[in-house]
Image (cartoon, rainbow, N blue to C red):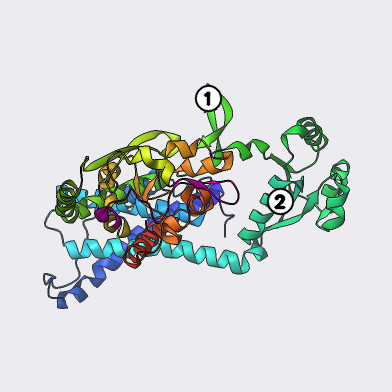
Amino acid sequence: MFRRFSVDFALFSIFLDTVLVLASLILASVLRPLLNSLPFIKEMLGIQTFPTVIYIIFPLIWVSSFLAFSVYDPGRNFRPEEEFTGLFLGSLLAGIALAGVLYLTYRDFSRAMFLSFLLIMIFSAVGWRLLHKTILRLIGHRFFRIHRALIIGAGKVGRDLQQKIAERRDTRLILVGLLDDDPQKRAADPLILDTLDNVREIVRTHRVDHVVVALPRRAHERANRLVADLHNLPVKVYVIPDYFALSLHHAAVEEFAGIPMLDLRAPALNDYQRAIKRTFDVAVTILLMPLALPIMGMIALAVRLESRGPVLLHQDRAGENGHTFKMHKFRTMVENAESLQHLVEREDENGRLIHKTAEDPRVTRLGKFLRRISLDELPQLFNILRGEMSLVGPRPEMPYLVEQYEPWQRKRFAVPPGLTGWWQVHGRSDKPMHLHTEEDLYYIQNYSPILDVVILFKTVNAVFSRRGAF
């Protein structure tokens, strides 16, 4: 077995995937006669074989597709969702490329056998990785050297790292403890072993392999001395800059003019996640359009007949990274409703602004109905097609409310705003959006394509239950 995230493991993965491609081709050939009993499969007698050149081309294309999506990159797949996203996209690219090869060369080849190969290979590629993860979780500590980590600093950054290590439940990584100069913290927590002055002794005593410096910005000089103290010990030293607290969502190291720098506005979604999310948005929106367009036409006519004013509103909203855009929705209020905003605005017991109420006198009768079942939001499908919004994400906020945000609330702008989101399916207007930013931050921190699908299904239930909509 190889150490995970090592170059050796990456080479082993390439070798194993190559073998699996060859094995899947052979197995698909053997299984082809068994498919003759299916009514939609053309009967072919005897074992069918792929041309010899296919056994060379297919492994090269498959491995190249995985390389293109960093499946073998030890530094890109620390989280399971990142690895399996790459597997999905790599398999999709490989399948399309291989189908193209067969179309241009062996067009009369059995499509059933090719599809069998794809299914076998995909299940094999995913299956051996899941098996490897399971083995590592169960008995990995018997085969790999245990790594011992020490955290310098028991402040917020250090405690966050301590929690992250505990959540990973990695039996090959042990946190031996923390160091901090605050006597009250040391007295309250036995995991805080000593002061920073005794770091060398602690490293030797506990056979520490990794030292993580998690000190606040004001302790810059102290951190420099610590790194100097450890320079002749066989340990790896990492530094977590306290500047992470200033980041929009998370930070990343990038080169700028050839100099490594900390990007405090790194996007919350990596390139693969963004590609999947955008593809999903466009595909679902296009599928919805034939149904949505006639409904929007009838709503537009009803709005025009009920009251004076434009059919559509084009409001400025804050989107990804705080950039403003025009959000479209059907008008549900009387004309010039914004000039009557003072009739509904109030402050709660904590002095926070409440700008929506269930008994808003500006809302028309048709508007109440449209809001109850969220049909006034349908024009935002065009915002989604333009790339200004996503199907799922934090709701786009009004700029004047954004001006009152606290710094931590601005982290909700780390992803594209959505037609629906975690906030909408957990309260909607019952929980004013600008007072419940934590709902959006939960979504950002736990984003996955599966979560988007779950939220969409929950949205249907929330709409039909008419809960919290006004």
Residue 241 vertical placement versus 35 (above, below): above
- Looking at the rendered structure, the number of numbered marks drawn on it comes to 2
Q: Residue at x 47, y 61 (%)?
A: 129
- Secondary structure of residue under mark 1: strand
Instruction: Quadrant for the C terminus, please.
Output: bottom left
- Location of residue 181 in the rendering, given as x and y in whole percent from the top left corner: 85, 44
Task: Bin the neighbour count of mark 2 within 10 Å (Cα to Cα): few under 14, some 14-19, many 20 and up.
Answer: some
Kindly identify the amino acid type of the residue bearing the numbered disc 2. Arg
Q: Is residue 73 left or right of 465 when viewed as pictured?
A: right
Task: Bin the neighbour count of mark 1 within 10 Å (Cα to Cα): few under 14, some 14-19, many 20 and up.
Answer: few
Q: Residue at x 28, y 46 (%)?
A: 380
Q: Residue at x 40, y 56 (%)?
A: 358
The residue range painted magenta reads 344-368
Residue 67 visible, this orientation: no
- Location of residue 62 in the rendering, given as x and y in whole percent from the top left corner: 34, 51
- Secondary structure of residue under mark 2: helix
Q: Main secondary structure of the magenta part?
A: loop
- Location of residue 459 in the rendering, given as x and y in whole percent from the top left corner: 36, 61
Report if residue 109 lies within the magenta region.
no
Kindly identify the amino acid type of the residue bearing the numbered disc 1. Phe
Using the image as rendered, state which of residue 316 and residue 205 is in the foreground. 316
Quadrant housing residue 119: bottom left
Label number found at residue 159 = 2
How far is the residue under mark 2 from the one under mark 1?
A: 31 Å
Q: Residue at x 69, y 45 (%)?
A: 157
Identify the residue position indicated by label 1 in the image.
256
Using the image as rendered, state which of residue 192 and residue 173 is in the foreground. 192
Report if residue 351 lies within the magenta region.
yes
Q: Are marks 2 and 1 in contact (CB under 8 Å)?
A: no
